[in-house]
Amino acid sequence: MTHRMCGVVVVALVVVAGLAGCSKHSGEGAREPAVIRLVDVFTPKAIEGAAPAEAAAEPRAIWRFDTPAAPSADKRLAATRGWDSANVQGLAVRDGRLVGRTTTAFPILHVARTRDLDNAEQVHAVEIRMQASAGANLFLTTQGAAPVDLARAELRARRMPWPLTTPIVADGEFHTYVVPSVVPLNMLRVRQLLIKPTDAANATFAIESVRLITEREHLAGISSGVAWQGLKDIFHEAIVSRSPETLRFDVTVPPEGRLELALGTMEDLPPTFRVSVAENGQEPRVLLEHTVSTPNRWEPQAVDLRSFANRSVSLALSISADRPGTIGLWGTPTLRTGARAEAAAPRGVILIHADTLRADHLGLYGYGRETAPFLSRLGKEGAVFRHAFAQAGWTKVSTPSFLTSLYPTTHGVWSIPDRLPASATTIAEVYRAAGYDTVSYSSVPFTGSGSNLHQGFEELHEATSARVDERYTTKTAREFVDRAGEWMTRHERAPFFIYLHIFDPHSPFEPRRPYDGLWADAAKREEHLRQRDALRKAIGNPVMAERAMATRDEMIKAGVDPAAYLAHDQDWYDGSIRGLDAELSRLFERLRAMGLDRDVAVVFLADHGEEFQEHGRMWHGQSVYGEMMHVPLVVRWPAGVQPGVVDEPVELIDVMPTLLELSGLATPAGVQGQSLVPLLQRSGTGERRGWKRRPVIMEKQPQGEAEFPGASESYAIIDGDWKLVVNKVRAPGQPEYELYEFPRDPLDRTNVAADHPDVVQRLAKAVDGWHTMAAAARLKADADASKGLSPEELQRLRSLGYVK
């Protein structure tokens, strides 16, 4: 769960984790961190001259219905103060309230924001005061500036439930509901608000007010302290304080010591940040004075403390401003040695996660096109695992598996609303506890705080900040590689762990220029897009219709040639891979320029593949077949990894224990993968000593129709020369067992189960045994694991976003 907050605050995390605080990752092989994180040692006693909490300011985004209507250019919406609806009868403003009656169980209210559109603050929560006659839940979502099609919004919501929700009391009385944001919401991108006031048909509702509560408004009313705080979609572990407060810490400065931090505010009134040092009761010496006049951005700073090396000092962080109570954010304030430590472990570790990348579309896995020349060079310098398999076929489920080394059955993240329980230990937490600087670049909420996968990261760059061009909504590599390079430059003297999630191969497949015409015919672009629109009308399942992912029969029904359409999509897909490859090459240019290219361990992997109708469908997450589960895995570290090709079948849950062993760190108890180091470091005779061969397991957990068509449930096992697929919940006509020859049949084309009943029986029994083990280890939900925590301890977990 958790940052190892070594000091007076550690008890807040011990109970939930069920582990011994700072010793969670201690033991043989653990290194003593030469770092002091001020968020770890902060207590309220550190605050001097505390500014009293203020009453919340007037909200900057509020809708009320008890005041005179403002003039409106849209006469149709003038009577409802700008609100429109779907599946609602009689929407009107009466007696100072927005009222109506639902005609289905899916009513939608919609309003567009028209004021304060340059506000770049984060949204903390949405507050609604309302009454309803029936129903159990309220739902909300937001959209950008594009016009809203309510029918399409309903279709999308049916396949992907809105992320903001809360139970309601349907007793006809007015209640105030505060719905916290569970995914990052920046006001710049909250231009449309959609509300489902109840989930019951034929229910009446009345709304008195709706307001968006920004982080600034929220923080103004609470005491200063530790928080997970974002500015323009970049988040830090932070200490929030307000003028004229001073935060004081008694510390011993390490050799070559420096204080690294990022400063920021969401206030228009500029605060001035000061860092000063005093020792032996002498007059404090101001080492940094920095005024932040641009709100909603982080400004990295470093303070040289070498003149105080090895001495005990009083370190003071203070804020001043013209108005008392002005908020200032101290992002990731860290005191560490500035000297590079000589060690057998890598100086840094970079885990590169390419989303939706099939192994068989890469040259180093035998593909005919050179889609990734840089990755081919990387493979020659490292170990290429010929048979690496993901644990699940879509990002939401697969990513927690390799970041925790747990099977999906155990970590429990199966569906879009699920979050990793806080009791899990992520790879980032282990590195953080060992003194590494940690940063995450997350291209979708599935890999960031929306899944609770920010645990252990001091800094997180969330998805929306990387998408600067609406035409290339899935192409994040260029922006994130730029940011990662800048971050490494600031952190080059510290050991570091970088998680870099890049989304480029994911649909929509159209790549950036010039890669859009590398294999695809640019003259056919408009016709291909026209066919995509035609497919949406012919696809029967609304989930796939929204994504334009069709079966062969649906393509023929729409008058689309399946072979030509799929070829164009794959040409674009390959072009996106080439664009990704070019950006990764730039990342290694930066490493070489910094003199780190041989000192940094790099793992490159994908979370899953993509279907191009090999089994009759498009998209991903729907099966455990080879095109979905066979992924690239490359490990490069010249000092500790022998180059070559590894034929042993392995799992992505093996990545976490591998990197930790290479780094000389102990693996947490309960991980389910095993270290690949014996396969990376052959003995003098070429033997793989210490490796224990075991079956590979893959899962397709049951999801509802809102996420994937067909609530199927399947498991696969690879053992020796065989792959068995066990379909626990299956479509009509689908067999219970499918047996394929491995690795002769990599895409699972020919089912030979009828010819080998003995193999089917043996492997089915092995799957049952594995499932019993994985289910018995299932992590407890946060509500159960946090029982016994004090209100203060639970609040600390909530302030970091680990528990909602």
Image (tube, rainbow, N blue to C red):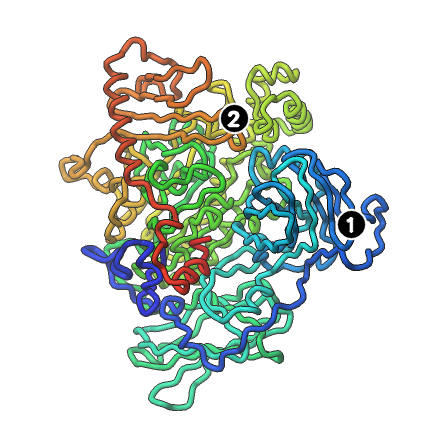
Tell me residue 493's x, y (percent).
36, 63
In the rendered view, does 90 fall on the left or right side of 312? right
Question: Disc 1 designates what residue?
Answer: 93
Relative to residue 580, is residue 140 drawn left or right? right
Q: Is residue 227 visible?
A: yes
Inspect the image, locate mark 1, and give the three-letter code of the amino acid beneath it: Val
In this rendered view, identify the residue nearer to me: 388 or 624.
624
Between 476 and 738, which is closer to the camera in this rendering?
A: 738
Q: Position of residue 626 (x, y in %)?
A: 39, 25
Dividing the picture into quarters, in which one does residue 779 lie? Answer: top left
What residue is rendered at 52% in x and 26% in y?
Answer: 709
Q: Residue furthest left?
A: 685
Q: Is residue 752 above or below residue 215?
A: above
Q: Nearer the viewer, residue 341 or 294?
A: 294
User: Which amino acid type is marked by label 2?
Assistant: Pro
Q: Which residue in the protein does label 2 denote?
A: 709
